[in-house]
Image (spheres, rainbow, N blue to C red):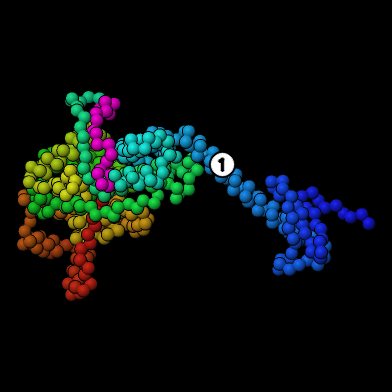
Amino acid sequence: MKKKKRNNGMGRVFKVQNKFYLQYTDIDGKRKCTPLKTVNNESIGSRAEAEEAAKVFLTNKKKIVEIETREEYLSERAKLKKLKARLTITLDNAFDRHLSKPHARVASSGALKVTRRYWQDFVSFVKDNYRLTTLDEVDKVHAEAYIAHIRRNGRWNTKISYVKKNCPVRKKFKDYEYGGALSNTTLNRYHSTCKAVFSFLLSELGYTIEENPFYQIHPLKLSPEGRDIFTDEELRLIFKNPPELIRQLFMIGIFTGLRLSDAATLRWTEIEQFSPLAENPDFLHHEIIRLTIKTKTWVKIPIERELNEFLMEQYLKTGQGEYIIPEAAELYYHHRNTLNNRIQNYLNSLGIITQKRIPGRKKAQSIKGFHSLRHCFCYYAGIRGVPLPVIKSIVGHFSQSMTEHYQKHADKKARIEGLTRMRGLLTSYSTSNALTYDQLRKQIAEYIDSAPDPVVDKVHALLLQITADEENPALETGPTYLISE
């Protein structure tokens, strides 16, 4: 009988001294020979078993070759990507290139200006010390050297220069050197900026996450000097006889907890149900609904009695315009430093210490300013019993894991009831309107004498609750303090 010919690529099975062998050609074209055995590594006794063993061996061999070929392909592809990145992604254009990628949040122009300066400092360092020009040339050793330098000495490029396109009209300016240690917070921002540029361009570089040169560098632990709240005496001084612009800003700050950027640029249309045609609008228990400038989070702030009185007064002056405080908005958008300086100068004129010297750092740490009103708002809301979820909902100061939880529980009714407890906050800082406790007792007694029965029931329920709290001091956990961002 004629022997059946094997298919091409299946090799040749032959027998020598009761042992079966397979002769085949590998991927490089070389002829090879291997003994055939069963899966249990035993000798094969028949040609049929040998043919089956040869088939299994060649199939596995083919899979291994395919895997190796795939790995070579991916390796070559990565090399080509890196070569392309080397030709197209330079240190100078890397920052703009990473901005073109989708980000979780759109940064403000001010934030981008600062982070761009951080990146440019790193670029200056590697250019001056290592003569690097492209992003793929940066290695872990360069990243570690830069971070070590700024942690020890401050920024690399200490020269402050006048850039005409940024400041076209100004007095004569001389370049100068600025140096000094940076805070841990600022150092971590330099680090995170550099890390982010590489992270967004990993795919174009053909890198894995671990190949980011800044990936293995741990950020510094933060131990910042906390911003202080204003004391009772300082608040009395502040609201005693302030300049009109300062009074307007501080009124909004103390009753809303808004940052200066949001207080200065607050619009009438951001008040719920606002109508520019109203002659005598009443904003009581309406809400300020605003997307904050810094964090791009929505806040909803109920308008209580004192804030309502201020807004009604302000409406007569600026109600036909866009902004509640037009002068503040103008200064914020066009002369921001002037607005900040006016606030700080006013506080300094009252003898309030606004800055603190930190050992080893040239720049003084700001400890009191307009932002302290945000801390005051949260602090006094806490000690007056406003629930923590309500405070967090109002100020919009959420961690990522807490945002959804607190927004879910703090609805409009809870916010209104919460801020009702803030009534009279400013009254105690105005000598003309302050009431003694004897006057308060008399006022309460007169009110109860003429109040309808349902109101008496409510007051009685509150009295029972207060009495229960006094009889069970172990249940009291003290005031809830919230330190705002």
Q: Which of 38 and 371 is in front in this view?
A: 38
The residue under the point 50% across, 39% down is: 82
Identify whether 242 is placed above or below 52: above
Q: Can residue 35 be seen in this view?
A: yes
Span colored in magenta = 150-167
Identify whether 197 is placed above or below 403: above
**In this rendering, would 187 be left or right of 176?**
right
**In this rendering, would 115 be left or right of 371?**
right
Q: Is the magenta stretch mostly helix, strand or loop?
A: loop
The residue under the point 73% across, 58% down is: 34
Q: Name the residue under label 1.
A: 77
Q: Regarding mark 1 in the picture, which secondary structure is present there?
A: helix
Q: How far across and down, in percent of the image, does residue 87 sit?
A: 48, 33
Identify whether 236 is placed above or below 83: below
Q: How far across and down, in percent of the image, does residue 274 sit?
A: 28, 42
Q: Nearer the viewer, residue 149 or 109?
A: 149
Q: How far across and down, in percent of the image, does residue 311 sit?
A: 20, 43
Q: How far across and down, in percent of the image, does residue 103 sit?
A: 41, 43
Q: Quadrant of residue 334?
A: top left
Q: Nearer the viewer, residue 216 or 351?
A: 216
Q: Nearer the viewer, residue 24 or 316?
A: 24
Crowding around mark 1 (Cα neighbors within 10 Å: few <14, some 14 to 19, many 20+) is few
Farthest-out residue, front: 17
The residue under the point 53% across, 41% down is: 79
Tell me which amino acid carries mark 1: Arg
Quadrant of the drawing holding the N terminus: bottom right
**In this rendering, would 449 be left or right of 266?**
left
Q: In which quarter of the image is residue 249?
A: top left
